[in-house]
Image (cartoon, rainbow, N blue to C red):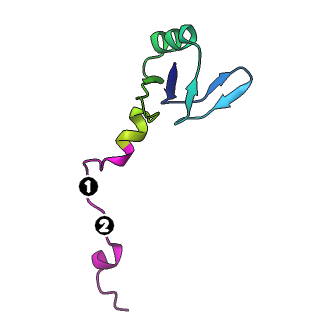
Amino acid sequence: MKILVAKFTLVYNGAEYPTGSIVDVPDEVAADLLASAPKEFVQVSVDEAGQSDIAASADNPQEGLPPVDAAKLRKNERF
């Protein structure tokens, strides 16, 4: 099962996986991690094309503030 390390760092089999890493671990290990620390790990499902939910959501624009052009926001500076 693949899980996303949402917070902190996961150390598994001598390797360190930082925040944002997707790790493929046995189902039993993943179930234990998800049950013991649900805020730190998220289950990632993979579709038939091999694309994860995380990657699919990255293709869609997120709601939020629009991009800002800093040059337009600067006031005329006079010395």
Residue type of the residue flagged with mark 2: Val
Residue 57 at x, y = what percent? 35, 40
Magenta-drawn segment: 58-79
Quadrant of res 8: top right
The residue that mark 2 highlights is: 68
Left or right side of 75 for 13: right
Query: Residue 74 or 37: which is nearer the viewer?
Result: 37
Query: Residue 54 or 19: which is nearer the viewer?
Result: 54
Residue pushed farthest front? 48
The residue that mark 1 highlights is: 65
Q: Residue drawn at (59%, 18%), measured in percent from left and top?
A: 25
Q: Secondary structure at mark 1?
A: loop
The vertical placement of 17 against 31, above or below, is: below
Residue type of the residue flagged with mark 1: Leu
Left or right side of 2 for 59: left
Q: CA distance from mark 2 to mark 1?
A: 9 Å
Q: Are marks 2 and 1 in contact (CB under 8 Å)?
A: yes
Q: Residue drawn at (41%, 36%), measured in percent from left and top?
A: 54
As for residue 57 lying within the magenta part, the answer is no
The vertical placement of 52 against 70, above or below, is: above
Label 2 neighbourhood size at 10 Å, few (<14), some (14-19), many (20+)? few
Q: Residue drawn at (44%, 36%), measured in percent from left and top?
A: 51
Residue 26 at x, y = what percent? 58, 13
Give the main secondary structure of the magenta stretch.
Answer: loop
Q: Secondary structure at mark 2?
A: loop
The vertical placement of 19 against 68, above or below, is: above
